[in-house]
Image (cartoon, coloured by chain):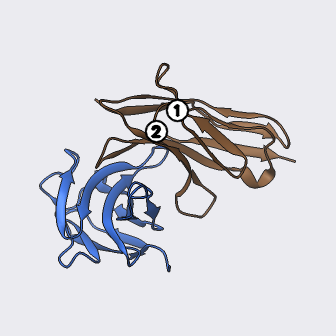
Chain colours: A blue, B brown
């Protein structure tokens, strides 16, 4: 169990640019979640995958945001035409398929995005 | 809608003091309830959880009881240590979505 990893850890970009983040979940976990966290707030749910299927999307996920999990393993979160309001920590979490543990999330260290 | 309301911080306690961090929730259906902890410089970690009414979650000396009648899940610890200094988040899960509170910062001084 190597934990959830995220790349990059930090990203600075200019307004209007596109950015892509990657999340590698714990290998046997079939559920994967993306969250956004701003300073002084709790994580806000963005989207959820079970294997390769995207099953839930928050209304926070505007059409500039897209997430994929093509083979049910790693996931990417892309933000197009970034805005300063997108500056936040983007967190990924995964959870196992084991009955009774499917809601036990393991979080990655996050990717901190700064939009100038 | 679904939401979690947490006691505002920051909270500062002396070592060995009793800790309570209040958490109330609004949810449709029968959510599972969680406390997560974020130590300085680290990612979020699950501290404890409860999946149905009257369940008590416990870990590392922390406890919380799922109270459906008061829609609460208050976190308690009888004797805090300096190493408990962290930010604590209450959360609920309605199935596929998690809702987090804003977090309560705890500092324990020797």
Circle 1 SS class: loop
Quadrant containing the C terminus of chain A in the rendered view: bottom left
Q: Which residue is mark 1?
A: B66
Query: Left of A69 or right of it: where is B97?
Result: right
> Residue at horizontal 37%, vertical 64%?
A113
Picture quadrant where residue B39 is located: bottom right
State how far apart marks 2 and 1 are (Cα). 16 Å
To the question of a shared chain for discs 2 and 1, the answer is yes
Regarding residue A66, the answer to whether it shows in the image is no
* Mark earlier in primary sequence (2, 1): 1
Q: Position of residue B17 (x, y in %)?
A: 82, 36
Q: Chain of mark 2?
A: B
The residue furthest front is A99
**Relative to the observer, which residue lies in front, A26 or A66?**
A26
Question: Which numbered disc, 2 or 1, marks the residue closer to the eye?
Answer: 1
Tag 2 and tag 1, C-beta contact below 8 Å = no
**Relative to the observer, which residue lies in front, B54 or A82?**
B54
Q: Which residue is mark 2?
A: B101
Regarding residue A64, the answer to whether it shows in the image is yes
> Residue at horizontal 27%, vertical 67%?
A14
The residue furthest top is B69
Picture quadrant where residue A31 is located: bottom left
Q: Is residue A109 above or below residue A61?
A: below
The residue furthest left is A63
Q: Position of residue B78 (x, y in %)?
A: 78, 38
């Amino acid at each position: 169990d190597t934990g959830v990893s995220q790349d990059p850890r930090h990203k600075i970009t200019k307004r209007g640019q596109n950015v892509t983040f990657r999340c590698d979940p714990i290998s046997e976990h079939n559920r994967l979640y993306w969250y956004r966290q701003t300073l002084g707030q709790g994580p806000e749910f963005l989207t959820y995958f079970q294997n390769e299927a995207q099953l839930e999307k928050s209304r926070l996920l505007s059409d500039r945001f897209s997430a994929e999990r093509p083979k049910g393993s790693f996931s990417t979160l892309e933000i197009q035409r970034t805005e300063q309001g997108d500056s936040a920590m983007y967190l990924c979490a995964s959870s196992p398929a084991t009955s009774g543990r499917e809601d036990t999330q393991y979080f990655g260290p996050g990717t901190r995005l700064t939009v100038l | 809608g679904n939401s979690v309301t947490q006691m505002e911080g920051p909270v500062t306690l002396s070592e060995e003091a009793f800790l309570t961090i209040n958490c109330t929730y609004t949810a449709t259906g029968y959510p599972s309830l969680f406390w997560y902890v974020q130590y300085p410089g680290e990612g979020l970690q699950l501290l404890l959880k409860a999946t149905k009414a009257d369940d008590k979650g416990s870990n590392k000396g922390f406890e919380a009881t799922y109270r459906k009648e008061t829609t609460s899940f208050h976190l308690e610890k009888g004797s805090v240590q300096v190493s408990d200094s962290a930010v604590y988040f209450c959360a609920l899960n309605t199935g596929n979505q998690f809702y987090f509170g804003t977090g309560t910062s705890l500092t324990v001084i020797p």
